[in-house]
Amino acid sequence: MKRALKPAEAAEMIPEGAVLLIGGFMGVGAPHRLIDALVARGVGGFTVIANDTVRPGQDIGKLIDARLVAKCVVSHIGLNPETQRQMIAGDLEVELVPQGTLVERIRAGGVGLGGVLTATGLGTVVAEGKPTVEVDGKTYLLEKPIRGDFALIGARQCDYVGNLEYTLTAHNFNPVMAMAADTVIAEPHHVMPVGMIPPDAVKTPGVLVDHILERLV
């Protein structure tokens, strides 16, 4: 059984300069309260690996606004002109990764693969400096796996052993990120007694989850 933490308690666990896998897709499925707690704490220098940087004042965009992010690894910057401003000014490093490649690199990190072979990005700036592998006469980029120090993920509900259930587009990044970090912190909307979530609805088993936040009141 896991004790449900307050967001501020969870934020205190995350040191300056940590590599953070943050779930969500333009904010859907993101750990909103945990991000707020990180902003309130004010410790940064983070590398953020996520699909996007959302918008100013929303979810990951709040970390950008507070200048707590040193580097982003994302498929696009979202609708966030502040990310663009910091990037152009040289205050924020942004690595753009094709969306499918990003997901597969995270998945590879979670299941222990040595990399992903993909044709996406060949002949573009994406391929610069990366090794290639030929398979059956076709050339592929070797994309290396991604892991994080922490995965910060949002869920619809969990139980007190940490089994997680997601809804709709929250499935996009959260389940793979939960496999690819040294420490997983889950932020559910609801915390249920053990046995209330049907086994086939569990998308992330509790054995992968280190900490859960208290339910949304």
Image (spheres, rainbow, N blue to C red):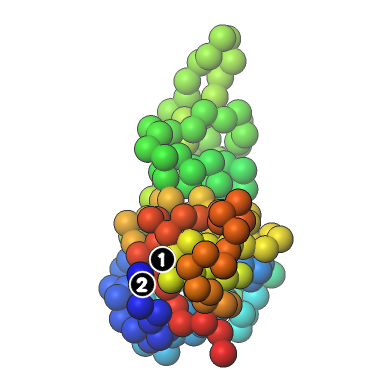
In this image, 118 relative to 106: left or right? right
Q: Amino acid at mark 1?
A: Val
Residues at marks 2 and 1 touching, judged by CB atoms closer than 8 Å: yes
Which residue is at 40% across, 34% downward?
113
Q: Quadrant of residue 83?
A: bottom right
Q: Is there any visible trace of residue 30 in the rendered image?
A: no
Rendered image: mark on residue 2: 2
Horizontal and vertical percent position of residue 39: 44, 84
Q: Secondary structure at mark 1?
A: loop
Horizontal and vertical percent position of residue 214: 46, 82
In this image, 207 relative to 97: left or right? left
Using the image as rendered, state which of residue 54 and residue 205 is in the foreground: 205
For the C terminus, the image quarter is bottom right
Q: Quadrant of residue 5?
A: bottom left
Label 2 CA crowd tier, 10 Å (few <14, some 14–19, many 20+)? some
Q: Amino acid at mark 2?
A: Lys
Label 1 CA crowd tier, 10 Å (few <14, some 14–19, many 20+)? many
Horizontal and vertical percent position of residue 15: 28, 73
Which residue is at 52% across, 64% downward?
195
For the N terminus, the image quarter is bottom left
Q: Which residue is mark 1?
A: 161
Q: Residue furthest front?
A: 195
On screen, 160 above or below 98?
A: below
Using the image as rendered, state which of residue 151 and residue 59 is in the foreground: 151
Q: Secondary structure at mark 2?
A: loop
Q: Is there any visible trace of residue 192 in the rendered image?
A: yes
Q: Residue furthest top?
A: 136
Using the image as rendered, state which of residue 169 and residue 17 is in the foreground: 169
On screen, 83 above or below 36?
A: above
Horizontal and vertical percent position of residue 33: 51, 82
Q: Quadrant of residue 69?
A: bottom left
